[in-house]
Image (cartoon, rainbow, N blue to C red):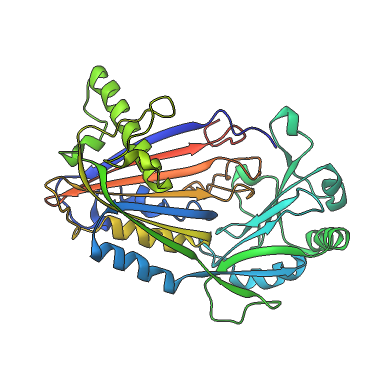
Amino acid sequence: MPSPGNTRTVVTTGGTPTQSTLSSQAGVDKLHTLASSRPFTRQVDVVFPACAALEEALVQLRASFSYWRCECGLGDFLAFAKSYVNENALESNIVALGLGGPVGDDVWCIDSRGILTAVVGKETYEVLGLVGEPLPWKEHADEHVIRISLRASRPQAQSYKTCHSYGSKEADAILRWDTKRGPWKIVYYYSGTDNPPLKGIQSELKQSIQKRDNVHMPNLEDASMLVRRGRTDEESDAWGESISSLFEWIGLASLGSPRISANDRCDPYIAVYAPPEPSYIGNLTCLRWSGLIPSCFIQEIIEQISSPNLASESSAPFVAAVTAQCVGTSPVSYLPQSASKNPPLRLPRENAEGTWSLVCARKDGERWWALAESVGQYDKRWG
């Protein structure tokens, strides 16, 4: 396994001082496409000050969402999946992931655009006989990315020049692969009322709740402290340290770390931690979901933590955060907003980095947000 070193993180911010609904605020495009542009998510954590109304709304969400598991050949699954691929819309009604196993490290996924993307080794590449694109890292140049559109025609964009349309040639190639490899373990979610194929088993999202009293809570004083723009170079440096401290706190809160407890007395030889400044002592709620998490579920979470009706028990702005981790073994982790752009190349592996964390702060009708996105060494999203 390669090391997940060389993690790169980009922070973007936005907000509005007057509007109260998510759909009419600045940054609407970013927040409304945040979940759908990441269709393969394995874990989501939400942290927020104790709030019974928000907790109840989030807990009730799970009842409306689930995912499925089945074991079959890829060709058989594609026959089912094609009926859920929209020919004229950018977003289809099925997302699926073929899990690697003891017979090799080959993996594939069907993203919400209706594109099958497979990352395969040299032997499988020769068996398939389809033109693909080699991974751009020297130590992994023998692995290739093959894209097949399940629509009637392949995308016309130049970036999809190596994308095939699913026809008889491609179906024969998949059959050869299935014959050589055998059935796949597949996880997927879809929008439809039809019975699932091939004895599919419905799985609930796993959910856990942790409540903690007397912890250090970030006090942003003014929600606009999240925003970078309009600052001098010196102020920008200070803002960078402040926002890093805030996201560190979010990470520790999601992990249930004792470091954020007001009563923590850790030996400084073991760990040294200081909470964001300023802070206050309050009660914290942490929720976690795991599984193959549908994008629409995550979007509902974003809507909930951005609600104009949330209020803090203290005089500080109400601060809530959601953190999501992608499926490391998925060939695709991010879909660009532009349909003319290919998803960035990445090396699928268990410990691949692909994380984003969104923090929203609201007070007196104002709402501001900051988003931190991280990718690992073998990911070409940012070059």
* On screen, residue 118 above or below 245: below
Q: Is residue 76 left or right of residue 221?
A: right
Quarter holding the C terminus is top right
Residue 90 visible somewhere in the drawing: no
Tell me how many marks there are: 0
The residue lying at 69 percent from left, 54 percent from top is: 108
Question: Which percent across, then down, holds residue 375?
Answer: 52, 37
Q: Residue at x 58, y 30 (%)?
A: 5
Instruction: Say which quarter of the image contains residue 154.
Output: bottom right
60 vs 104, left or right, is left
- Expressed as whole percent of the image width and height from the top left, the position of residue 39 reads 52, 55
- Front residue of 266/102: it is 266
Q: Name the residue at the top extreme.
A: 234
Asked where in the image residue 211 lies, by quadrant, the reply is bottom left
Q: Residue at x 62, y 40 (%)?
A: 345
* Residue 240: x %, y % from top left: 32, 27
From the top left corner, tell me how far across and down residue 305 is, in percent: 29, 56
Quarter of the picture containing the N terminus is top right
Instruction: Report if residue 82 is visible in the image.
Output: yes
7 left or right of 48 in image: right
